[in-house]
Image (tube, rainbow, N blue to C red):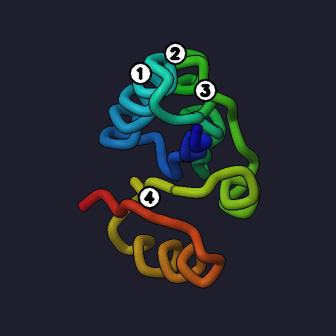
């Protein structure tokens, strides 16, 4: 049996919180392993993390270290920089746009 994909969400704002909810539901159903969430606003991350029982990660680097696939749900201006770095590390990404 293949192992589950480990996913993390970067950005927990107005759209990111929905991505967190969906990955939490997918993890509860046994489809993915939800590695955690990261947001530059730690208060927002803590609030959303508590609501969906998601682990809070301290940085994008920490998220990359514990996930195979990362969902980038940050302000558009940050998409390229984050995606480029993660792709260079061989990570699978989904960019919310």
Q: What's the CA distance linking mark 4 and mark 1?
A: 18 Å
Q: Which residue is mark 3?
A: 54
Q: Which residue is mark 4?
A: 72
**In the rendering, at what x and y percent does residue 2 appear?**
57, 43
User: Percent x, y for residue 81?
Assistant: 50, 80
Q: Nearer the viewer, residue 86 or 59?
A: 86
Q: Which sits earlier in the primary sequence, circle 1 or circle 3?
A: 1
Please tell me how crowded label 3 is: few (under 14), some (14-19), or many (20+) other residues with Cα within 10 Å: many
Kindly identify the residue that appears in the image at 58 percent across and 37 percent down: 1
**Left or right of residue 30: residue 60:** right
x, y percent for residue 61: 73, 63
Which sits earlier in the primary sequence, circle 1 or circle 2? 1
Residue shown at 44% from the left, 33% from the top: 23
3D distance between C-alphas at marks 1 and 3: 11 Å
Instruction: Classify the position of the C terminus by image quarter.
Output: bottom left
Local crowd at mark 1 within 10 Å, few (<14), some, or many (≥20)? some
């Amino acid at each position: 049996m293949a192992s589950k994909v480990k996913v993390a969400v970067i950005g927990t704002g107005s759209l990111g919180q929905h991505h967190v909810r969906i990955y939490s539901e997918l993890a509860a159903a046994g489809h993915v392993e939800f590695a955690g969430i990261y947001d530059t606003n730690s208060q927002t991350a803590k609030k959303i993390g508590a609501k969906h029982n998601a682990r809070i990660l301290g940085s994008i680097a920490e998220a990359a270290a514990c996930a195979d696939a990362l969902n980038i749900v940050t302000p558009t201006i940050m998409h390229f920089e984050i995606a480029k770095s993660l792709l260079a590390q061989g990570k699978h990404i989904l960019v919310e746009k």
